[in-house]
Image (cartoon, rainbow, N blue to C red):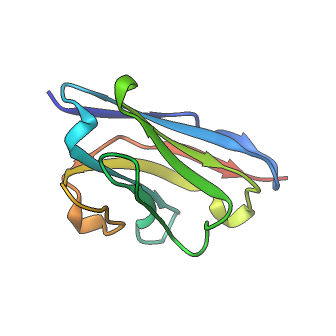
Amino acid sequence: QLQLVESGGGLVQPGGSLRLSCAASGFTLDYYSIGWFRQAPGKEREGVACINRRGALTNYADSVKGRFTISRDNAKNTVFLQMNSLKLEDSAVYYCAAVRMYFGCSRRVDEYDNWGQGTQVTVSS
């Protein structure tokens, strides 16, 4: 059974860092593009970053560009989101998602058909 499990969320002060992990089981990530998404209370889910299946191509939302870095280790079947210089507005539930895609990656929610359960990130002083 295809499963994605996020971890690494927590409470951090503004300016701090967190590293999220997305571990896949039941399938290999080699043929999948991965996206990180977030959803704050009362807001729509938005695409934060994505990475293509080989890790050569990434794409970021303007709001996180220069602060967040997405990466993947296909040997470990895991994708990461390094989040630096966190801001209050980064607080949300963060989800990873996978889609079988041979070229490029996407930050569109409706492109993805496999989702994790989410991990809470709270930025607060």
Pick the residue in front: 60 or 22: 60
- Seen as rendered, the residue at the extreme left is 1
Which quadrant of the figure has residue 24?
top left
Question: Whole-percent x and y of residue 35?
Answer: 37, 54
Rendered-image quadrant of the N terminus: top left
Counting the numbered discs, the total is 0
Instruction: Tell me what residue is drawn at x 33 percent, y 53 percent.
Output: 52
Instruction: Tell me what residue is drawn at x 76 percent, y 44 percent.
Output: 12
Question: Whole-percent x and y of residue 66?
Answer: 67, 64
Q: Is residue 83 above or below residue 4?
A: below
Which quadrant of the figure has residue 88?
bottom right
> In the figure, is residue 106 to the left or right of 40?
left
Pick the residue in front: 57 or 59: 57
Instruction: Tell me what residue is drawn at x 36 percent, y 40 percent.
Output: 117
- Seen as rendered, the residue at the extreme front is 56
- Seen as rendered, the residue at the extreme bottom is 62
Pick the residue in front: 48 or 73: 73
Q: Is residue 26 above or below residue 113?
A: above
> In the figure, is residue 80 to the left or right of 89?
left
> In the figure, is residue 108 to the left or right of 28?
right
Question: Whole-percent x and y of residue 17?
Answer: 73, 45
Question: Whole-percent x and y of residue 33?
Answer: 29, 51
> In the figure, is residue 78 to the left or right of 40?
left
